[in-house]
């Protein structure tokens, strides 16, 4: 079966302004996740990897928030902590549902079960995230069966509707995942995530394992589903070109911390943090003459170890604007302009280069 795009292209209509007029759906405050480092025969704890170290953000209803950064910066750990697929070390995760505020970290596994219906995940590798021994129909229906939502004919009709909603055929429910292409497998994963009609989907690099020709189709699909169902997304990615077109706001992570946050268009035009400037310098521009004029910023050294992060600003060993205060005092994430936050001592003074959004 050929890959199919559903609806109008997302790249033509994706919003670049934050949807702050909508009520908050999820609020994250001071989120931390540490993994112990153990050594010796008795597995004595000798330290900890600070994978996520004090992260704050809000996702509004119907909004797509992009979470970007280099591999190993903690993006995926944040997404898994939100759904409590791994347990956070500290912090607050507040979900606003049915007029109430629910603090997720205080809930037992049994109390989390109805909450999981509101929050689902699309994984990075569509092949590894699907059970090869189950038919597509069983995969998509599993959330409905486990939560005792539907059964019998109603269940089968719901599975057919979900597959058709993501651009597949109802008859595909009888086939196994190996019979589908990578893009089609990711559509199956999206159908499974939609089964319980969630409010929020955590999409962990949902197109990075796909061919470029297929990526746009999956992004179009996600944008269409957002419009049809009022979904909110946490879109985790290291591809700024993708984030530019699908996300309303962007949060940039470096070594377990958010260093900049703001509206997508504004951030691409006027980055406020040197790390964001360096990331944007690697984004290709369509105009060859403009591309030749642009400065490519090459960061020196390697990313420091999250088990032993540098003092002060974590980016200062690689920052070309660093001064003595950067090694002595950690800058807070504060509002530099309306809706634009940055963790840099000189964010208000530096004239950083962006790209056209």
Image (tube, grey):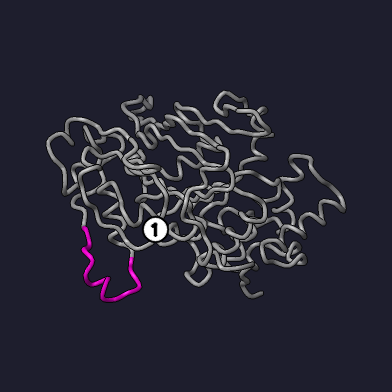
Question: In what element is the residue under mark 1?
Answer: helix
The answer to which image quadrant residue 2 occupies is bottom right
Give the residue drawn at x 21%, y 32%.
311
Give the residue drawn at x 24%, y 42%.
348
Q: Which residue is mark 1?
A: 240
Q: Which contiguous range is marked in magenta?
A: 284-297
Picture quarter with the C terminus: bottom left
138 sits left or right of 280 in the view: right
Q: Say above or below: 78 vs 208.
A: above
Q: Furthest-right residue in view?
A: 153
The answer to which image quadrant residue 219 occupies is bottom right
Q: Is residue 272 visible?
A: yes
Q: Is residue 215 visible?
A: no
253 sits left or right of 247 in the view: left
Residue closest to the eye, 272 or 155: 272
Picture quarter with the N terminus: bottom right
Residue closest to the eye, 133 or 144: 144
49 sits left or right of 230 in the view: left
x and y, in percent, of residue 182 in the image: 56, 65
């Amino acid at each position: 079966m050929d890959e199919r795009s559903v609806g109008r292209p997302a790249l033509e209509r994706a919003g670049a302004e934050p949807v702050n007029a909508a009520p908050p759906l999820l609020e994250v405050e001071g989120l931390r996740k540490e993994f112990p480092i153990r050594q010796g025969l008795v597995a004595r704890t000798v330290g900890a990897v600070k994978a996520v170290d004090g992260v704050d953000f809000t996702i509004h209803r119907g909004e797509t928030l992009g979470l970007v950064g280099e591999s190993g910066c903690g993006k995926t750990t944040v997404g898994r902590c939100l759904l409590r697929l791994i347990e956070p070390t500290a912090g607050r995760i507040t979900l606003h549902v049915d007029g109430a505020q629910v603090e997720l970290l205080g809930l037992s596994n049994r109390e989390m079960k109805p909450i999981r219906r509101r929050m689902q995940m699309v994984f990075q590798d569509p092949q590894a995230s699907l059970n090869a021994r189950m038919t597509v129909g069983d995969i998509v229906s599993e959330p409905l069966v486990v939560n005792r939502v539907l059964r019998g004919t109603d269940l089968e009709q719901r599975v057919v509707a979900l597959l058709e909603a993501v651009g597949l055929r109802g008859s595909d429910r009888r086939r196994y995942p190996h019979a589908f292409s990578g893009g089609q497998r990711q559509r199956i994963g999206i159908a499974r995530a939609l089964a319980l009609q969630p409010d929020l989907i955590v999409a962990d690099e949902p197109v990075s394992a796909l061919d470029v020709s297929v990526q746009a189709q999956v992004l179009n699909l996600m944008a269409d589903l957002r419009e049809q169902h009022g979904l909110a997304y946490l879109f985790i990615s290291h591809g700024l070109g993708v984030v530019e077109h699908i996300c309303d706001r962007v949060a940039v992570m470096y070594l377990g911390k958010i260093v900049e946050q703001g509206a997508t268009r504004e951030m691409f035009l006027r980055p406020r943090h040197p790390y964001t400037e360096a990331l944007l310098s690697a984004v290709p521009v369509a105009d060859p003459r403009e591309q030749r004029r642009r400065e490519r910023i090459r960061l020196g050294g390697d990313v420091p170890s999250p088990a032993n992060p540098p003092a002060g600003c974590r980016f200062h060993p690689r920052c070309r604007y660093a001064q003595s205060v950067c090694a002595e005092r950690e800058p807070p994430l504060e509002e530099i302009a309306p809706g634009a936050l940055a963790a840099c001592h000189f964010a208000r003074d530096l004239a950083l280069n962006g790209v056209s959004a």
